[in-house]
Image (cartoon, rainbow, N blue to C red):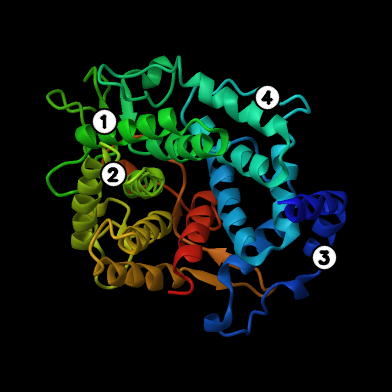
Amino acid sequence: MKRLRATLAAGALATAGLLTVSAAAPQQHTPATRPAAATDWSVAMVDSTTARFTPSTIGSWSYPVGLYLYGQYLTYRRTHEPRYLTYIQSYVDRFVRADGTMDQNFNSLDSMQAGRLLVILHRETGEDRYRIAAKKIRDRLNSFPRTSDGGFWHADTSSRAHQLWSDGVYMVNPFLVEYGKEFGDSAYANDEAARQLAVYGRHLQVSNGLLRHAYDESKTVSWADPATGLAPEHWCRAVGWYSMALVNVLDALPTGHARRPQLVGILRDLAAGLERYQDPATGRWFQVIDKGGQSDNWTETSCSSMFTYALSRGAQQKYIDARYQSVARRGYRGVLAKISLDSDGRTNLTDISIGTNVGDYAFYIARPRETNDFHGLGAFLIMNEQLRSR
């Protein structure tokens, strides 16, 4: 721990210089002619992204940036490259003052996802301001609005009232179990995270094993079925968020936790559905998961990374059958087909859906496909750190 803190402190003094060198020295990036099999794609992606953006220009406090930087942290954990951690701290320190206060109101689950970085920085540096900042999220949950059976609304706003979105479980629950472990609050954190996944799963998972994008308890919003309250489609990234959250929380729960069998059952049904709808031609998954036979549907990179990670980790941990490792490996090969190096040796990851509201089939299919969108970069890094040596 002392070595890590010393390294981080030293790196902080050199942040600006390191970023300048990274942006000005393309020889640090993997050459475009290097064989793909020899490329460390996590390192190449992090080096490319930190050359394209400084901690000040990468974006606001948000879940897509938080997701990407969590993936960067996983790469740091393997490589011990100090500038990767220094970069994360420089980003977070734009929002956390010396006394630990933040201007964020945390009125949506989305706004909480980057809180994982606060827990990470407390663990790596020991600075109490990160604990204070993280506790603001933890305390906000005490008053956060819920459905009648205890599920957190997607946001504390009239437009999201009474709604559970599959996306939301990833925005808060991995943070929550990590907060609990770091700060001695696991009794609450584990129970709450498991409860959220169970409530969301009960409402959103249907007979094919997949989850619908969202549920409206009031059954009044335009996209909700008037009988069930469910959204009409299985949007792939929403289900991807849920799949990753489910594995993360299972990893944190004690073996004898009362909700563990229920959550494992949800994962097993979901894994079977994902296997059923994996595109046999590419190994990836479609933007609307169960309608791959429609000519305008397309395989989406971020959700394919998420499913690949969740299936591999779930099989590794024996939550699901070992045969799902082969499903994950097909997914991994499919996602790797979407990454390449440009003439400067920087990575490009393609066919990533931009952020998306709840809608119908035509709405999802028409969503713009971006290159190097942070939803895709973060999911790719999480997947790659799980599967690169498997």
Mark in the foreground, 1 or 3: 1
Eyeballing the image, is 180 above or below 254? Answer: above
Mark closer to the chain start, 4 or 2: 4
Q: Which mark is residue 362?
A: 2
Q: Is residue 210 visible?
A: no
Mark closer to the chain start, 3 or 4: 3
For label 3, the SS is helix
Q: Disc 2 to disc 3, how far (Cα)?
A: 43 Å
Q: Disc 3 to disc 4, how far (Cα)?
A: 33 Å
Q: Which mark is residue 102?
A: 4
The residue that label 3 is drawn on is 24
Q: Which mark is residue 199?
A: 1
Image coordinates of residue 336 in percent, x first then y, are 45, 71
Residue in the picture at 21% in, 37% down: 232
Mark in the foreground, 2 or 3: 3
Contact between labelled residues 4 and 1, with CB atoms less than 8 Å apart: no
User: Which residue is at the front of the view, 254 or 157?
Assistant: 254
Q: Is residue 273 left or right of residue 383?
A: left
Task: Give, as a three-letter code, the residue at label 2.
Answer: Ala
Q: Disc 1 to disc 4, how far (Cα)?
A: 30 Å
Residue in the picture at 41% in, 45% down: 252
For label 1, the SS is helix
Q: Disc 2 to disc 1, how far (Cα)?
A: 28 Å
Q: Is residue 238 left or right of residue 220?
A: right
Q: Disc 1 to disc 3, how far (Cα)?
A: 50 Å
Mark closer to the chain start, 1 or 4: 4
Mark closer to the chain start, 1 or 3: 3
Q: Disc 4 to disc 2, how far (Cα)?
A: 39 Å
Category of crowding for the residue at label 2, using alpha-carbon neighbours closer than 10 angstroms: few (below 14), some (14–19), many (at least 20): few
Contact between labelled residues 2 and 4, with CB atoms less than 8 Å apart: no
User: Which residue is at the front of the view, 153 or 296?
Assistant: 153
